[in-house]
Amino acid sequence: MERDPFMQLQSLADRVALVTGAGSGLGEATAVALAEAGCRVACLDVRGEAAERTRHRLGGNHDHLAIACDVGDEGQVAAAIAQIAETCRRLDFAISCAAIDHTYSVEEMSIEQWDQVIRVNLRGPFLIARAAMPQMRRNGGGHIVNVASTAATRAWANAAAYHASKWGLVGFSRGLGVEGRPHNIRVSTIFPGGMRTHFFDRFEEQGIPMPDERNLQAPATVAEAIVFMLSTPGNSVIQELMITPLSETSWP
């Protein structure tokens, strides 16, 4: 039986993708997966040396980029997008992986800590999308992926700022998708469960029990799910996707 041509996955070869938080964790894994899929990748990270390390890891024939960028800074984001546009002549995908958390109760958390979580986790994806969409419209379309969390589906103690940022990111992504639709700009949100990254490093310092590594998944698994979302046929979009370890204890 002949396959419907509209069901074929799209090739990502020679597309240009930016990834925030690309210096480590899910951001790094996503940059690697996109490069392996044939993309030219711009690695953005607040730590320039970490972005450069990831860029060096990508190798291959593409001229990948490493850009030091604080995603909460409007000027730095605008400059990063301008550099990508000038160097690569296009921008197809924007994946916002950068995130931060301060694990304190509402009474213990400082206003500065609250503001930092919202700045990176919610303001950052807004600034990235705001700067990226004009470039995507010039290409005739594009795809934005925002990384939420299972923390945007339920709540637990000492994570109010993180919950607020990730629940907010879901609402932002849904509104963004409506705005992008007429311009052929797709918007997807992915909800990863726990991953084996440095995200939990501060738990030990604060005396919080560390999660059992057997209940965490590899960032590369989530990264491959992001690649799949980007590869779906252009007439469809995976609006939201949740991927957790099989033994995830925070869901359902």
Image: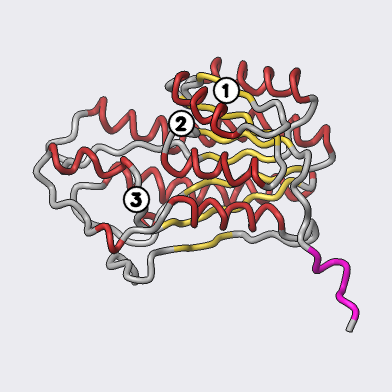
Mark 1 vs 2: CB contact within 8 A: no
Classify the position of the N terminus by image quarter: bottom right
Label 1, on which residue? 66
Q: Which mark is residue 196?
A: 3
Residue 233 lies in the magenta-colored region: no
Label 2, on which residue? 23
**C-alpha distance separating marks 3 and 1:** 24 Å
Give the magenta-colored segment's residue range: 2-8
Considering every residue shown, the one lying at the far front of the view is 60
Q: Is residue 1 above or below residue 78?
A: below
Dot 3 amino acid type: Arg
Q: Position of residue 228 (x, y in %)?
A: 64, 58
Considering every residue shown, the one lying at the far left of the view is 207
Pick whichever of labels 1 and 2 is earlier in the sequence: 2
Q: Count neighbours of disc 3 (C-alpha within 10 A) and say few if under 14, some if 14 to 19, many if 20 or more.
A: some
Q: Position of residue 162 (x, y in %)?
A: 32, 44
Q: Residue at x 41, y 64 (%)?
A: 244
